[in-house]
């Protein structure tokens, strides 16, 4: 029994893939169907986004390979409405969504981002590491 354990101890484990963290910012335009509730008419910088579909903190962000396989999952870390208004009706014109995805395996040529079922585009590892800005 001791001999068997010593023999197994000499086996090397398969190396885990190198991982990285990706991050980004999405500037989501509020189209004609998006609205701000009546009591939220006067938004301040830092207020939550009110878009359709609504995007909230904690929403899932997926990173996929070119075969549509999920490589990593992350979350929306913050949603805010900048202090920018439509001068005619005071509705916010866009909101800003920040996200982070950890433990993305290195080595893919490109990474496809998805937020709440919507495709955010295809990016390289370097772009994700630096922080993508999607408008």
Image: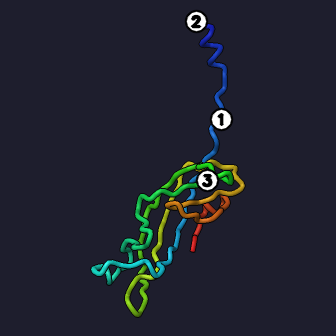
Q: Is residue 98 above or below residue 70?
A: below
Task: Classify residue 63 as left or right of residue 45.
Answer: right
SS for tag 2?
loop
Task: Classify residue 33 as left or right of residue 114.
Answer: left
Q: Quarter of the image for the C terminus: give it.
A: bottom right
Identify the image quadrant of residue 45: bottom left
Colour treatment of the image: rainbow
SS for tag 1?
loop
Q: Residue 92: x, y in percent?
A: 41, 82
Marks 2 and 3 sit apart, C-alpha to C-alpha, by 45 Å
Closer to the camera in the image, 101 or 61: 61
Q: Residue furthest front?
A: 33
Kindly identify which residue carries mark 2: 1
SS for tag 3?
strand
Around disc 1, counting alpha carbons within 10 Å, would you say few (fewer than 14), some (14 to 19), or many (20 or more)?
few
Q: Is residue 124 above or below residue 32?
A: above
Task: Classify residue 108 as left or right of residue 21.
Answer: right
> What residue sits 37% from the left and 88% below the top?
90
- Asked if disc 2 and disc 1 are in contact, CB closer than 8 Å, the reply is no
> What residue sits 58% from the left and 55% below the top?
63
Sequence-wise, which precedes: disc 2 or disc 1? 2
Closer to the camera in the image, 4 or 39: 39
Q: Residue furthest bottom?
A: 88
Kindly identify which residue carries mark 3: 64
Q: Quarter of the image for the N terminus: give it.
A: top right
Around disc 2, counting alpha carbons within 10 Å, would you say few (fewer than 14), some (14 to 19), or many (20 or more)?
few
Kindly identify which residue carries mark 1: 15
């Amino acid at each position: 029994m001791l001999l068997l354990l010593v023999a197994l101890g000499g086996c090397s484990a398969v190396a885990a893939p190198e991982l990285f963290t990706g991050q980004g910012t999405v500037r989501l335009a509020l189209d004609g169907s998006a609205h701000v509730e009546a009591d939220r008419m006067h938004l301040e910088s830092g207020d939550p986004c009110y878009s359709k579909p609504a995007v909230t903190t904690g929403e899932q962000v997926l990173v996929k390979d070119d075969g549509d396989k999920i490589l990593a999952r992350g979350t929306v870390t913050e949603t805010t409405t900048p202090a920018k208004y439509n001068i005619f009706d005071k509705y916010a014109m866009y909101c800003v969504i920040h996200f982070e995805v950890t433990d993305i395996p290195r080595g893919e040529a490109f990474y496809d981002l998805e937020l709440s079922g919507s495709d955010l585009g295809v990016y390289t590892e370097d772009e994700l590491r630096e922080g993508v800005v999607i408008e």
